[in-house]
Each structure stands twice: as structure tokens, then as C-alpha cells.
Image (cartoon, rainbow, N blue to C red):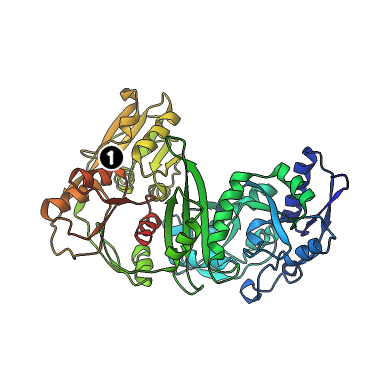
């Protein structure tokens, strides 16, 4: 294309970063451009509440009008801001790479409480304008007070700095792209599996006029086809729901490859009909993405309450129970095991300490061992959070429910270093078995597991087993009844069930409460 291309963009610092990034990418491809700044309704009315803005596209409409009117040749948007129903005459011709789609929770340090979910103090004042974030936060922390927060990223951060809020949400992508130093705050990065982002979060959309073959050819030079495939699925799922960009629905997809190098897709979702409801959480997998959005949306829209029994003691008001009961589920639970501390004296000095459960963390740190600045590895976000309550941070977190895979990843990281494993007496040692050099491994029993009576268990539709020990204690006295669905927390628990002849077992997608809920709602 011989003429200089005009790129349309909003005037905020982040929008200009995005436009300049695309300008540089096109320049590398030999395409000359200039940037034209266009004000949108969202910019002109910075204090208007998102929830009170009717319709969609309040950050995009004026730019799209300029594109349709041929004032510009190309529009650059945060893809998540684009309405999922395309504007007539326009199309997305290409997409950027995907920046980290995680949400970043910035907390003033005096408002931090490491013993509470999200590490926010009781009744903290949290600023956000997204209903999707609001419903997910209130499900976890119903005591948190949420107030509308508008403005560009630097403006929002300044409001936090000025103590107008205890905490605010920003997209991790925005902080990364602008290179903002947030070290003055406690920054908590929430993975897209636990706080599900907006469709296409972290991706830039390059919008062109429909039928403009020359511009399509130009933007295809910098297109990322795999990102395009993934965000297309996210947006198709979202588009099958009635509601605008304020619909409380988070969707996040990834494409992975199995051991035979065959592609498959994963998706996480959090959905509430309104901003007054507690969301439901989902996890899906498929090898057939063509028909997937329809099937996923139908599953999310449907709600088929069942009775659930979990092998742990639960409180009436805990997160797990509250979410299920809000959707009409009956919830009961009881642990079939209890724990007893084992005194261990002064532990050996090692390069790493690895915890495979919250119990191991508790019974290790309760004895106040001197460990210095040793590195820490854990399985799952819940175990990592438990470590944080003792003033430490995990340097490695294994997210896979396959402990063998986590063990291999950890062993590769440790290399020739030594590792202390605080654990249960008679532990299955799944992580340790992945170390080729056994002299690197130092086992330290810090608690033992004791069986409790198994009686008066309701005939629930869904049985959720949280550990191999709970499976063994249950099956000594009871049996699974016909028609009951079984969920296992981790492959070790699943293998114990399968050894007992129970072959139809569902695995939780992650070792935390949201993972448990995703397994139940997705059945």
C-alpha cells in the first residue's frame, strides 16, 4: 500500500501505547503510518457509571464512525472493549500477541490482611467499575465494600495513592505495557483461572472496513493466528448471552497440545445473571472447537442443582457452601480423618522446602523452625496462600492436578539442590519419586493422619473426595451407590478410587475451592 495509513486511537496513555506499538510493528513490515487521536463517549464522560451507560461501545463508537467515514484507515482497540456483535461494515482484520490476561489487585499496604481471602482487610473499600470483577470478588469476600472507579490507569492508581480506596483492580496487561512501578502497593496477581477475565483481555484488535482487501493484506503481516483462534472462541461464547459489556461473565481459553502433539482447548468461566447474584464457576475441555461455543454457553446458562457431599468439615457460610447454595445445591460435608502433630526438632538445612498440602504447612510452621531464606515450593494456590500466612512466599507453585507432572517440573527447577519435604507420616511421596537422585530428598514427617467414624452420610448425588486418606477411611465402612458421581481432588485421590474399582472419576481442574466448584458445576 503506497499511501500513509492513518491509525485511529483514543488519547489515553494506554491507548496511545497500543497505537504506537502497532505503528512500530507495521513499520517493521515496511508500512508507513500516522496516528490520529479521537475522543470517545467514555473519555468525554469520565465520571459516568458504566452500569448507567446504555448500549455498548462507549470506548469505541466514535473511532468506528471515523473508520466508516474513511477519516482513518485502521482502528486499534483493546479487544475486550469491542462489542461482540460486529458493527455493520467493519471487521477485525488482525490481532496482536496476548499480554498476561490476569487481573492485578493493588492494595494499600495498611489494608493488607494475609489471613483473609484476596489478602484484603475486613470491610476493605475496593474500587472497580466492572460487574464481572464485582460479582467474583463479593463471592469470595461478601464483606468487601465496592465503589465505582473510573479514569485511565494512572488516574486510578493516583486515587489509590490518595487513599480514596483501600484497593483497586487494574489489568496486568496495562501495568506491563505502561511499565508502571507499583512497588509502593501490595500487588496481588490473580490468575485467569481464579478471577476470570473479560473475553480477549490482553489482546489488541486491528479493526478495518469490511471488504478493504488492501488493508486486510497489510494487517495480516502482523497478525497472530493462534491468539485470533482463542479469542474468537471467547467472544463467540460471550455473544451467545443476552447482555452488553457489563454482563457479569468472564471467559478465558487456552490452546494446548497433548503428549502426541495433538491440539486441545481449555476454557474457564464465571457467570452471574446480574450483579446482585453469586456467580457459578466452570471448566471445560474439547478437541472440537467448531461447535464448542454453543455447547459451553448452553451449559453455563443451564443450572441443574444437585446434592453434594465433600470429605471435609464445612461451615454454613464458607465460600464453597455459599456459592453452591446460591444456585440451589444442597451441601453437606465431614472429614473422615483428623491430624496429630509430630514433633521434629531442628530441621536439616536444605536449598528448598516443599509443601504438598496446607496441613504440612501448618504443622511445620507451628513448631517455629529456623529456616532462614530457604526457597519454598508448593502444590496449588491454596497451599501457597497458607505459606503466606506465616510471612513467607512460594518461589514455585505447581498448578497441575497431576502430581507427577508437578514433581518433574519441580525436580528440573531444583537441579542438584537438596529439598526438605515436611509431610504426613506414611505419605505417598508423589513429588519425591520424580527425583532421579534420591540423596537430594529429605523426608520430614510433621503430622500423622487418623481415621474418624464414618456414619450418617447422606446419599448425595455428588461425592467429592479431597484426599486418598479420606477415600480409604470412607471405603472401609461405606460404598459408592449407583448413580452417584465421584469427583477427586488430584490424581493421587483419583488413583486410590480407581484401585478400589471406581473407574468413572472426575478430576478437579485445580487444587483450590474454585477448582472444586468448577468440577461440580461442569458435571
Which residue is farthest left?
477
For image coordinates 43% across by 47% down, the residue present is 391
Residue 141 in sight: no
- Total number of numbered labels? 1
Question: If the image is split into quadrants, where does the N terminus sit?
Answer: top right
For image coordinates 47% across by 55% down, the residue present is 268
- Along the horizontal axis of the image, is 220 left or right of 127? right
Question: If the image is split into quadrants, where does the C terminus sit?
Answer: bottom left
Residue 492 placement: quadrant: top left
Residue 57 in sight: yes
Pointer 1 residue: 423
Q: From what the image shows, is residue 412 above or below residue 18?
A: above
Mark 1: give few (<14), some (14-19) or many (20+) Cα within 10 Å. many
Q: Position of residue 397 (x, y in %)?
A: 43, 42
Which residue is farthest right?
3
For image coordinates 32% across by 28% down, the residue present is 441
For image coordinates 41% across by 39% down, the residue present is 377
Residue 478 placement: quadrant: bottom left
Q: Position of residue 331 (x, y in %)?
A: 28, 67
Q: Position of residue 444 (x, y in %)?
A: 27, 35
Residue nearest the observer in this picture, 51 or 142: 51
Q: Secondary structure at mark 1?
A: strand
Residue 283 placement: quadrant: bottom left
- Along the horizontal axis of the image, is 111 left or right of 310? right
Q: Position of residue 217 (x, y in %)?
A: 75, 46
Residue nearest the observer in this picture, 149 or 391: 149
- Along the horizontal axis of the image, is 128 left or right of 143? right
Residue nearest the observer in this picture, 86 or 308: 86
Amino acid at each position: 500500500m503506497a499511501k500513509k495509513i492513518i491509525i485511529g486511537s483514543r488519547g489515553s496513555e494506554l491507548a496511545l501505547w497500543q497505537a504506537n506499538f502497532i505503528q512500530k510493528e507495521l513499520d517493521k513490515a515496511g508500512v508507513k503510518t500516522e496516528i490520529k487521536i479521537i475522543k470517545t463517549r467514555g473519555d468525554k464522560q469520565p465520571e459516568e457509571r458504566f452500569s448507567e451507560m446504555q448500549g455498548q461501545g462507549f470506548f469505541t463508537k466514535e473511532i468506528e464512525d471515523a473508520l466508516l467515514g474513511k477519516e482513518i484507515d485502521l482502528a486499534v482497540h483493546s479487544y475486550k472493549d469491542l462489542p461482540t456483535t460486529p458493527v455493520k461494515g467493519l471487521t477485525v482484520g488482525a490481532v496482536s500477541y496476548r499480554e498476561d490476561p490476569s487481573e492485578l489487585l493493588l492494595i494499600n499496604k495498611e489494608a493488607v490482611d494475609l489471613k483473609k481471602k484476596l489478602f484484603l482487610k475486613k470491610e476493605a473499600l475496593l474500587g472497580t467499575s466492572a460487574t464481572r470483577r464485582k460479582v467474583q470478588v463479593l463471592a469470595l469476600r461478601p464483606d468487601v465494600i465496592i465503589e465505582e472507579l473510573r479514569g485511565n490507569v494512572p488516574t486510578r492508581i493516583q486515587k489509590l495513592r490518595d487513599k480514596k480506596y483501600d484497593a483497586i483492580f487494574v489489568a496486568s496487561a496495562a501495568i506491563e505495557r505502561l511499565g508502571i512501578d507499583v512497588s509502593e502497593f501490595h500487588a496481588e496477581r490473580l490468575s485467569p483461572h481464579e478471577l476470570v477475565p473479560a473475553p480477549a483481555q490482553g489482546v489488541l484488535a486491528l479493526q478495518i472496513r469490511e471488504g478493504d482487501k488492501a488493508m486486510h493484506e497489510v494487517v495480516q503481516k502482523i497478525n497472530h493466528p493462534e491468539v485470533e483462534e482463542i479469542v474468537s472462541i471467547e467472544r463467540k461464547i460471550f455473544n451467545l448471552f443476552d447482555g452488553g459489556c457489563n454482563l457479569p461473565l468472564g471467559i478465558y481459553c487456552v490452546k494446548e497440545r497433548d503428549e502426541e502433539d495433538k491440539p486441545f482447548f481449555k476454557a474457564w468461566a464465571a457467570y452471574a445473571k446480574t450483579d446482585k447474584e453469586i456467580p457459578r464457576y466452570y471448566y471445560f475441555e474439547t478437541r472440537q472447537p467448531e461447535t464448542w461455543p454453543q455447547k459451553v454457553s448452553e451449559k453455563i446458562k443451564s443450572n441443574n442443582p444437585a446434592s453434594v457431599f465433600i470429605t471435609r468439615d464445612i461451615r454454613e457460610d464458607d465460600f464453597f457452601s455459599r456459592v453452591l447454595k446460591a444456585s440451589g445445591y444442597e451441601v453437606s460435608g465431614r472429614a473422615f480423618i483428623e491430624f496429630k502433630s509430630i514433633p521434629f526438632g531442628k530441621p536439616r538445612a536444605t536449598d528448598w522446602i516443599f509443601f504438598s498440602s496446607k496441613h504440612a504447612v501448618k504443622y511445620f510452621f507451628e513448631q517455629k523452625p529456623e529456616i532462614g531464606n530457604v526457597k519454598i515450593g508448593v502444590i496449588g494456590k491454596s497451599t501457597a496462600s497458607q505459606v503466606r500466612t506465616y510471612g513467607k512466599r512460594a518461589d514455585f507453585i505447581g498448578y497441575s492436578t497431576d502430581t507427577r507432572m508437578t514433581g518433574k517440573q519441580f525436580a528440573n527447577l531444583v537441579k542438584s539442590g537438596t529439598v526438605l519435604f515436611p509431610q504426613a507420616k506414611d505419605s505417598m511421596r508423589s513429588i519425591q519419586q520424580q527425583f532421579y537422585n534420591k540423596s537430594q530428598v529429605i523426608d520430614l514427617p510433621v503430622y500423622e493422619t487418623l481415621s474418624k467414624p464414618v456414619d450418617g452420610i447422606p446419599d448425595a448425588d455428588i461425592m467429592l473426595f479431597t484426599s486418598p486418606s479420606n477415600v480409604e477411611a470412607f471405603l472401609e465402612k461405606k460404598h459408592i451407590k449407583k448413580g452417584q458421581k465421584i469427583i477427586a481432588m488430584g490424581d493421587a485421590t483419583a488413583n486410590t478410587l480407581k484401585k478400589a474399582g471406581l473407574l468413572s472419576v472426575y478430576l478437579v481442574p485445580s487444587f483450590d475451592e474454585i477448582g472444586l466448584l468448577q468440577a461440580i458445576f461442569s458435571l
